[in-house]
Image: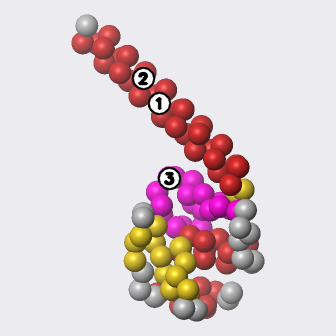
Amino acid sequence: MTEEELEEILLRRKRIHKGYIRIRTNQVEKRLHRVIVEHAIGRPLLFSEIVHHKDGNTLNNSPDNLEAMTRAGHSMIHKYWEKSSRRRKNKLLEYEANRDG
């Protein structure tokens, strides 16, 4: 896909479905982040590949926020985020309990 083709795709009408921006290309609806990564790596993504939004914002499709990875690698990242988030929440609750007590 050339830069001009990507620019034309980005100008098309978009819709948000389940938190992801979707566009129509060649009569097929695709998630925009997948189109952008496929352009960046110069090939279609494999079925086994996932596009990860590094900042967690599925509407931020800036190329520097997107990373192609395996499904297993993606699962590991999100498990770490969940653990880390839970740990931060528990520390905050502990701090607030000690502060108020």
Q: Label 1 sits on what residue type? A: Arg
> 88 above or below 15?
above
For label 2, count other residues whose C-alpha is less than 10 Å away and answer few (under 14), some (14-19) or many (20+): few
Q: Which mark is residue 86?
A: 1
* Residue in the foreground of this view, choosing between 91 and 29: 29
Query: Which mark's residue is nearer the viewer, 1 or 3?
Result: 1
User: Residue at 36% of width from left, 17% of height from top?
Assistant: 95
Q: Position of residue 17 (x, y in %)?
A: 41, 70
Q: Which mark is residue 90?
A: 2
Q: Is disc 2 in contact with disc 1, using a CB cutoff of under 8 Å? A: yes
Q: Quadrant of the N terminus?
A: bottom right
Q: Can residue 59 be seen in the rendering of this structure?
A: no
Residue at numbered disc 3: 56
Q: In the rendered structure, does residue 60 fall within the stretch colored magenta?
A: yes
User: Residue at 52% of width from left, 67% of height from top?
Assistant: 61
- Say which quarter of the image contains residue 70: bottom right
Q: CA distance from mark 2 to mark 1?
A: 6 Å
